[in-house]
Image (cartoon, grey):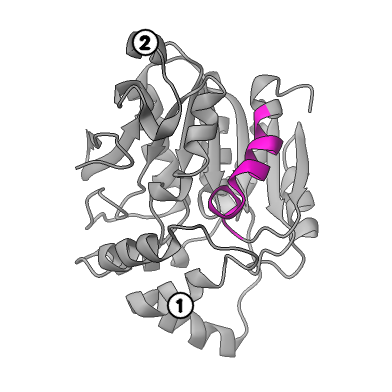
Amino acid sequence: MTAGMLTTQFLEIDGGRIAYDDTAFGDTAFDGAAFGDTADAADRPLVVCTPGLGDTRASYRHLRPLLVAAGYRVVTMDLRGEGESTSGWSDYSTPAVAAVLLALVRHLDAGPVLLISNSYTGGSSFLAAAEAPELFTALVLTAPFARLQPPLPPLMRVAEFAVTHVAAGWITYWTTLFPSRKPGDFAEVRKALTANLREPGRMAALRGMAASNQSPGEAAAPRVTCPVLVVTGSKDPDFKDPAAEGALVAGLVPNGRMRIIEGAGHYPAAEFPQETADVVLPFLKDPKSV
């Protein structure tokens, strides 16, 4: 199968296989961004992108060509139970997601990487970088859940049940997370995500992640030694005060900073790709200068 002109790769690990794509092994005119020589593509600085729960690596489809055009090799992955990765895993917790992330980075064997995460994988990013600091140059956390959140009120717990048990319920909620503008291919992507979530085991994976918490990532954050950039959308419906939440997460690490993308919701890489690139690329080029 392909994802935006890239052939899906698979990493076999204990319990299943993880799907990912790699611009070093794609079409030389991938996504309209000239690669040049494909051998050169493998030597570019590597950016690894991880989606949030209930989503797939397609979340980065509009940011990826901007990263490629800026000179990066880009790998996007599907989490356990999501996208083209296998379902039926026994563990979807933050540490389990971090373990898969570390396995993929080690498998790629391309030196320390620049990691971009979204939502649920914020805490996993902290945990992975704390456990293996030699594997990461810098972290970018977009709309991160990276600390223990207070319990939901009873009424919201009822709503959460509907959202995490029925594909249509999740898609209805997911649609609200793009508050300002939806990508031009939104209908097509929503249809594909709905079909994926209706496959056996997909909603169970979503529930497994939703039932987990971010305390392991929060506990690991003080041990993260690389620079961290938190990118927050000013209209992210998942947070009562997105700017305050972003500042709290950035403050968990010794070398954190936060930037706001005005108007963006929970998926800035898909909703505002150019604005996200404008914030992220200077940081990737020189993490200590931003």
- Structural crowding at the residue carrying mark 1, measured as other residues with C-alpha within 10 Å and reported as few (<14), some (14–19) or many (≥20): few
From the viewer's perspective, is residue 146 above or below residue 126?
below
In this view of the protein, which residue sits in the foreground, 23 or 157?
Answer: 23
Q: Position of residue 15 (x, y in %)?
A: 21, 45
Residue at image coords 51%, 44%: 124
Q: Mark 1: which amino acid?
A: Thr
Q: Earlier in the sequence, mark 1 or mark 2?
A: 2
Q: Is 218 positioned to the left or the right of 67 in the image?
A: right
Residue at image coords 34%, 21%: 28
The kind of secondary structure element at disc 2 is loop
From the viewer's perspective, is residue 41 above or below residue 223?
above
Question: Does residue 55 show up?
Answer: yes
Query: What is the quadrant of the C terminus in the image?
Result: top right
Residue corresponding to mark 1? 172
- Structural crowding at the residue carrying mark 2, measured as other residues with C-alpha within 10 Å and reported as few (<14), some (14–19) or many (≥20): few
Q: Position of residue 130 (x, y in %)?
A: 57, 32
Task: Write down the quadrant of residue 116 in the picture.
Answer: top right
| Main secondary structure found in the magenta portion | helix
Question: Does residue 222 show up?
Answer: no
Residue corresponding to mark 2? 37
Q: What are the residue bounds of the magenta stretch?
A: 266-281
- Asked if the magenta segment contains residue 274, the reply would be yes
